[in-house]
Image (spheres, rainbow, N blue to C red):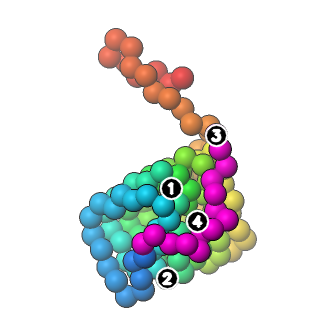
């Protein structure tokens, strides 16, 4: 597993700014920042940044998630890393191999930390490898 590149996170490919709302499915490549309201599903192998004041009600599946103070309600799956910075809030399950939670963050849910698992189906039964 390679370490995610967060060194140039200021280079944003798309921005949902303060005062904006979106409902639906979002899939993207690169770096996306949400400072507004989002409801639905978010999918990417890359970096999602949740800015201060953001409100997200969604299932989130990304490579790396950085919460800089916004709120997420919903389950989160990150392939590489989840970073939660104060005054961020997350309500839901988090699945990631690495997590950072800063003092002052509110996390209400559960966290599963395990390396990526591959699921294969044998004779109709799913098996974790």
Q: Secondary structure at mark 3?
A: loop
Name which quarter of the figure residue 124 lies in. top left
What's the CA distance linking mark 4 and mark 2? 14 Å
Q: Give the position of the N terminus as an image quadrant.
A: top right
Q: In the rendered structure, are the residues bearing label 4 and label 2 in contact, judged by CB atoms less than 8 Å apart?
A: no
Where residue 54 sits: x, y (%)? Answer: 46, 78
Q: Please, what secondary structure does the residue beneath circle 4 have?
A: strand
For marks 3 and 1 on the same chain, the one whose residue lies earlier in the sequence: 3
The residue to which callout 2 is attached is 53
**Residue that mark 4 sits on:** 66
Label 4 neighbourhood size at 10 Å, few (<14), some (14-19), many (20+)? many
Q: Residue at x 45, y 70 (%)?
A: 13
Residue 24 numbered mark, or none: none
Distance Cα–Cα, label 1 vs label 4 = 11 Å
Residue at mark 3 = 1
Q: Mark 1 sits on what residue?
A: 46
Residue at the far right: name it: 103
Range shown magenta: 1-14
Residue farthest along the bottom direction in this orientation = 19
Q: Earlier in the sequence, mark 2 or mark 3?
A: 3
- Please name the residue shown 67% across and 49% down the image: 3
Counting from the top left corner in percent of width and height, residue 84 is at 62, 66
């Amino acid at each position: 597993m390679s370490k995610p590149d967060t060194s140039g996170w200021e280079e944003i490919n798309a921005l949902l700014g303060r005062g904006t709302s979106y409902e639906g499915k979002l899939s993207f490549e690169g770096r996306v920042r949400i400072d507004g309201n989002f409801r639905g599903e978010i999918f990417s192998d890359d970096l999602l940044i949740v800015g201060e004041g953001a409100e997200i009600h969604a299932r989130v599946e990304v490579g790396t998630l950085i919460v800089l103070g916004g709120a997420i309600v919903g389950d989160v799956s990150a392939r590489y890393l989840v970073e939660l910075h104060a005054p961020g809030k997350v309500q839901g399950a988090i699945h990631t191999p690495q997590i950072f939670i800063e003092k002052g963050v509110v996390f209400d849910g559960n966290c599963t930390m395990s390396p990526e698992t591959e699921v294969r189906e044998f004779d109709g039964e799913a098996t974790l490898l």
